[in-house]
Amino acid sequence: MSDKPGRLRLSSRQREFSPTLRSAPPLPAIDWSQVGIAPPELLPIGPEKGLPAADAIVLTWADAEWAAMQQVFCSSGQPMPYADRNRGKWSGWTQYAEGMLHSATHSTRDWSYWGEWRLVEIRGKRVLLFKSNTHLDFPGEAQLVAMVERLIRQARPSLLLSIGTAGGAMVGDHLGTVRAVSAGTLYEADTPRENWPVYSNAWSATDSPLSKAGLASLLYPIPTTEADLQALCNQFNTFHGTRYSIFDLDPNGLNSGDTLPKVVNSTGGALSLLTTPVFVVGTTAGDYSQYACIEMDDALVGKVCAAEGVDFGFVRNISDPVQNAELPDEVQGSWGSTVYDAYGIYTSFNGALTAWAMLADWA
């Protein structure tokens, strides 16, 4: 096995592809009475400058993840239409651009704010929700590190959770599996895998809210059907001019959601996720099965938290499971992106709900 992952950049053509589901259901409203806990309470928008003090920060990244965060933490009283998965703007959120770190490469024309925030209260704890506009792949590591430092130094939390979508690393993790860990491994080019830096801490979420029967009923089974997956396969082939069968693209039904979404709480242990600078795909060959999942920011978040003395955890949902190792690399990445585009809002809902449960029982 090579020490270098299959590093992929999605082609501009794949980025132009917008797969659709014919009858996609909305995200459900949440009946909080099933767990006997009040819903998150929205707090006033202020201050005019800077960030408010908070006990915890919940950080998310892409638009579909933001939509799921909005639904779980801010607007759970009514369903959210599937079309809102790429909405990219929500009322009540404040754009944060103070102290922007610009360079000759990344100016205000293409990167003009760190992200957007909103404050809620969960069982007496102030929680700062933050949708990042700053990533490892763009505008880069220096800007990502600077953003996390600013969040911590201004809000002064004792805990930071990063939540969102991820690629699968373990063959048994079907679409929608949620994996939570307290460690991140950072891929470094031209460095043997055993020497990649790991940033970890001892923070551990209790299992009590995660194991309640009520929470299980709030989790939303990913609405995959054979017809929908076949339709995505047909759209994929038409767009890319290929002739792959659904059995090529979906080995062993990995892209079908479990009847009861799987939530694996490995916080406080040695299991780590893998952070990569570009889109990397885990495959059925088990090439990254030593990791919980694969994503593109969290190890650096953990690095900053460790330096600042803040506890941290990563709650990631599998939005693109491991891919058929026999397919060309480009096809693996493009199909994974297709599944993410179609189902990422649903997988992110369960990830956000899991993060809420951890915070609801956080001492």
Image: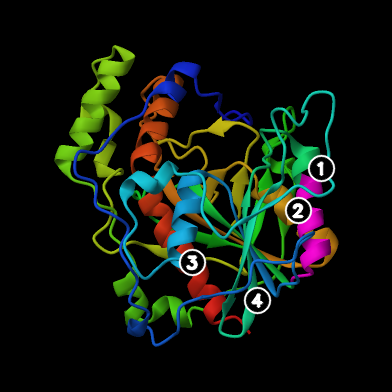
Q: Quadrant of residue 5?
A: top right
Nearer-the-camera pick, 50 or 286: 50
User: Mark 3 and mark 4: span between their CA atoms?
Assistant: 14 Å
Q: CA distance from mark 3 to mark 1?
A: 27 Å
Image side of residue 312 versus residue 69, left or right: right
Check contact, mark 2 vs mark 3: CB within 8 A. Answer: no
Under circle 2, the secondary element is helix
Q: Which residue is mark 1?
A: 100
Q: Earlier in the sequence, mark 4 or mark 1?
A: 1
SS class, disc 4? strand
| Mark earlier in primary sequence (3, 1) | 3
Camera-nearest residue between 110 and 92: 92
- What is the x, y in percent for residue 74? 48, 66
Q: Amino acid at mark 1?
A: Met
Secondary structure category for the residue under label 3: loop
Q: Residue furthest left?
A: 227
Our reading of the magenta stretch's main secondary structure is: helix
For residue 220, side relative to residue 294 (left or right): left
Q: Which residue is mark 3?
A: 74
Type of the residue with mark 2: Val
**Is residue 88 visible to the viewer in this orientation of the structure?**
yes
Answer with mark 2 or mark 3, whichever residue precedes in sequence.
Answer: 3
Q: Nearer the viewer, mark 2 or mark 1?
A: 1
- Residue underneath mark 4: 126
Q: Quadrant of residue 108?
A: top right
Mark toward the start of the polypeptide (2 vs 1): 1
